[in-house]
Image (tube, rainbow, N blue to C red):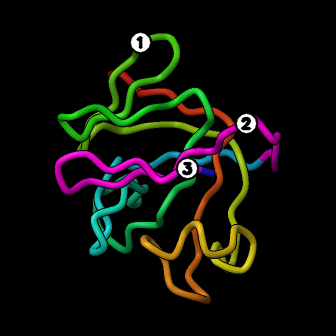
Amino acid sequence: MKVETQGGTTALVQVADLGGGDAAFEGVLATSPAGCLGLAPPDGSGTVRVVVWPADVSLSGEGELTTSSGEKLAVGDTVFGGGEDLEDLHEHRGDAVTACVEEGERGFVLGEVEKITE
């Protein structure tokens, strides 16, 4: 996993597609208190869960995520993704996530993500 930081925003990104779970997630792209990109509940309230983004996603200088297809994902966009919901992201991903989560903090590992357009 790599940690990308641009302009005070951090994204945790897989370095290879390792597959993962088959859970589906919908949420609002948001920034955690630690400055890391994650998902908030679809209504925009509640806790931001830090995400380990798919390997084909990169962080731009504007703090947006860009997928391999060129799709831009910005804070406030509603997104859909598939992957794993981990009870303790730190336990499963180790010290690489320390900048974004503490031990015992829940997070998501996504194998795919796309913006929901209305």
Give the amino acid type for the residue marked by disc 3 in the picture: Lys
Q: Position of residue 105 (x, y in %)?
A: 56, 82
Q: Are marks 1 and 3 in contact (CB under 8 Å)?
A: no
In magenta segment, residue 3: yes
Mark 2 Cα-neighbour bin, 10 Å: few <14, some 14–19, many ≥20: few
Residue 117 screen position, x and y as percent: 36, 21
Please report whichever mark, 2 or 3, sits nearer to the chain's N-terminal start: 3
Q: What label does residue 2 carry, if any? A: 3
Magenta stretch encompasses residue 56: no
Against 50, residue 73 (above or below) is above
Residue labelled with disc 1: 70
Point out the stretch of residues depicted in magenta: 2-22
Identify the secondary structure beneath mark 2: loop
Specify the amino acid type for callout 2.
Ala
Q: Residues within 10 Å of mark 3 (few under 14, many from 20)?
A: some
Query: Picture quarter containing residue 66?
Result: top left
